[in-house]
Amino acid sequence: MAGTETPAPPAPAAPGKARSLDEVLVAMDVVDTLRHRNEILSKEMDGEGRKEELIRRLKEIYSAQGIEVPDSVLEQGVKALEERRFNYEPPKPSFQTWLAGIYISRDRWLKPLAAAAVALGFSWGAYQFGVVEPAKAKAEAVRVELAETIPAELTSLRTGIQTSTEDAEARGLAETYYQDGVAAARDGDAKGAHAALANLKTLQGDLAVSYQVRVVYGPGEPRSGVFRIPDDAPQTRNYYLIVEAVDAAGRVLEVPVTSEEDQTVKRVKKWGQRVSEEDFYRVAADKGDDQIIQNDVIGAKVAGKLRPTYTVATPGGAIVTW
């Protein structure tokens, strides 16, 4: 237009003067263009006049894209490329870079780690409250039981038995069971202490009951007596009446019986009581006429006594199998 002057292009930035953001961005784009034009770098960066030729080629590239880039900016880009100003130089490995890498990758490991920590905390809590604490409580309960509860029960049972009977055998057993229980409790043997306590309770119960010893007969009872020939005396016979303990209500009781064959004590409802040959055949004759034994009671046990007293001769002990 007449009367106007064409404005001069902006002068290159003086040394030491800050460049504008646009200039820096264009320079970075120049460097990026150079970096992606490997054929230009390999062919034009060697030899005389490479810098001028490179700038010329760059101008052609940008002109083809409709972009006008001042020579000063192209020179800055070429210079920045030569100085590797926009090249990324990875930091050397160090403890700081290792920590930085961990922090940067936190999205990958933080959530799984947090979940693992929660699971671990839950497991620890479940173990503490589901295993450790109950075990502690159980151990404390056992300690109190062995130190206080069982000794007190043992003492009470022994005292009760000693004052309720004059039976020497029962009093001796009570003292033996008591001493066994005290020793087991002192040694931390809960099983042994409970066994002694159970023996005392059973002994107390056996002393309290009363019953009659009756010879069995009737339906379901194939025999009322048996005899045995001892191995060490083949010319001798031992006679036994099969009996049971019946209380006042007609109930058959399970009572302790010592077998003369192996000296073991077993709780049975029937046993073979050894009697004299005369009493054996008397009962057999009683049953033989009508299969009913009129005089079927041969003994009785009263409360406070451990063993029954018999009305027939009992020259030996008893058997529990036949």
Image (spheres, rainbow, N blue to C red):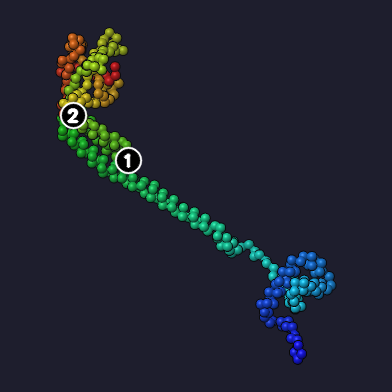
Q: Amino acid at mark 1?
A: Gly
Residue 232, given in percent of the width and then of the height, sits at 30, 12
Does 177 sit above or below residue 276? Answer: below
Residue 259 appears anywhere in the view: yes
The extreme right residue here reads 48
Task: Answer above or below: position of 3 versus 20.
Answer: below
Residue at left offset 73%, top offset 72%: 30
User: Residue drawn 21% across and 29% down?
Assistant: 206
Q: Which of disc 1 and disc 2 is earlier in sequence?
A: 1
Tell me the mark number nearer the camera, choosing from 2 and 1: 2
Dot 1: within a 10 Å radius of its alpha carbon, few (fewer than 14), some, or many (20 or more) residues?
some
Element type at mark 1:
loop
Q: CA distance from mark 2 to mark 1?
A: 34 Å
Looking at the rendering, which quadrant does residue 248 occupy?
Answer: top left
Element at badge 2? loop
Left or right: 294 in relation to 38: left
**Location of the N terminus (image quadrant):** bottom right
Instruction: Judge whether 17 appears above or below 65 on screen.
Output: below
**Where does residue 294 sit, x and y in percent of width and height?**
15, 15
Would you say 59 lies left or right of 304 here? right
Q: Nearer the viewer, residue 133 or 112?
A: 112
Amino acid on which the number 2 mark rests in the picture:
Val
Return the residue at label 2: 209
Residue identified by numbered label 1: 188
Q: Which residue: 19% across, 27% down? A: 306
Q: Is residue 54 visible?
A: no
- Identify the residue at the far bottom of this view: 3
Q: Position of residue 189 (x, y in %)?
A: 32, 38
Residue 166 picture quarter? top left
